[in-house]
Image (cartoon, helix red, strand yellow):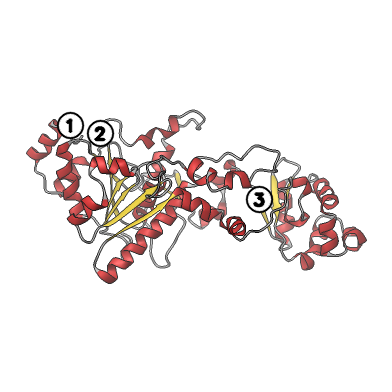
Amino acid sequence: MEDKGIFAGLKVLDCASFIAAPAAATVLSDFGADVTKIEPPGTGDPYRNLPHLPGYPASEHNFAWMLEARNKKSLALDLSRPEAEDVLHRLVREADVFITNFPPVVREKLGLTYAKLAPLNERLIYASFTGYGEKGEEANKPGFDSSAYWARSGLMDLVRADTNTTPARSIAGMGDHPCAMAFYGAIVTALYKRERTGKGSHVSSNLMANGIWAASVLAQAKLCGAKFGERRPRERALNAVTNHYQCKDGRWLILSLLNEDRQWPTLARCLGREDLITDQRFATRADRHARSVELIRIFDEVFASRDLAEWRKILDGNGLVFGVVGILDDIPHDKQMIENEVLVPFENDTMLTINSPIWVDGEKKVRPRKAPGIGEHSDEILRQAGYDEAAIQRLRAAGAVA
């Protein structure tokens, strides 16, 4: 197959905003799908304004929009105008996938329901994303990843440092992007079903379901009636060799030594504390766990004696499993991310962007193209849908397109 991508020729209508649903369309576009972003004339998709909200980093670039809207074409279409219905229906008749995350009540008002659009195209995949699902009293409740994914699932409570600290705040898109991958999976599953049956279908996902899936190990324990202990602070962790430590330069790392019996002597030597190998206080795994607080104090002192870069060389050089607690400053120069195409440059640019996290051997993704301006491709899309210049001007005069 050429470099146009696995989904070359697949027509996707992205009628969604904030963030999981349009991000799923972005993943489809990475593999070559032709994605049309439908957004309101004038102001455009409200997500364009995210970087201007209080607390977001200052930048000359619209970093949120360039990530979620790369590769897409923009059609500025006012779905509240009667004249827009014919445009939408023409596009739906030729589309493979229609993506929306409008609340059900809004879809009903704008004529975007599955019941309204599916009869126009029996091969259409109607992909619906919501905050809390499409049934029940919360079906029309707005949901963001901070509330429906992070808070509702229990993750916000579970990852706090200990029971005496406040619930942990999420960062922008932290739940939305994993949700996008689940939503993408639903769409691709429906496309596979269509290959077998020739028929489209309605697929869905939501923030709440994905949040509880992320928390599912402990959530399943609760469903099984398990008894939970207290969430202990780092200094009182139950296992010193699966704990995190601060280095001399203020950076942190986390040890993850699951094969503790075999790796304990190696760790002690790496730390320059061979005496711990024969120290009867820590002779067995049970001893080390029973005296974890004492061992953590020892490790704290040792790790504080060297910078993170030194510890990385020592621990990596001896095959010990650990992780660097990354910071944003690390990312632009992360060699491993760049070599594995986790970070890739935009087309005709040196600026990097974050790749979607799946690859298929023998298939290349398209080079990320810049995100569109509001209505940048309106005329092009309308012409392809069969509108002549006079019809396009009438739609503009009616305020349906821009």
Q: Which of marks 3 and 1 is nearer the N terminus?
A: 3
* Front position among marks 3 and 2: 2
Per the image, the residue denoted by label 3 is 324
Q: Which of marks 3 and 2 is nearer the N terminus?
A: 2
Residues under labels 3 and 2: Cα distance?
Answer: 45 Å
What residue is shown at x 83% (from left), y 46% (from top)? Answer: 301
Left of 90 or right of it: where is 105?
A: right
What residue is shown at x 58% (from left), y 39% (from top)? Answer: 169
Q: Residues within 10 Å of mark 2 (few under 14, many from 20)?
A: some
* Front position among marks 3 and 1: 1
What residue is shown at x 63% (from left), y 59% (from top)? Answer: 225
Q: What's the amino acid at mark 2?
A: Pro
Per the image, the residue denoted by label 2 is 41
Q: Earlier in the sequence, mark 1 or mark 2?
A: 2
For the residue pair 375 and 113, the one nearer the viewer reads as: 113
Q: Could you tell me if the residues under marks 1 and 2 are in contact, i.e. CB atoms within 8 Å?
A: yes
Q: What's the amino acid at mark 3?
A: Val
Residues under labels 3 and 1: Cα distance?
Answer: 53 Å
Residues under labels 1 and 2: Cα distance?
Answer: 8 Å
Q: Where is residue 335 in the image (x, y as percent from the top left)?
A: 56, 52
Q: In this view, does 195 lie above or below 385?
A: below
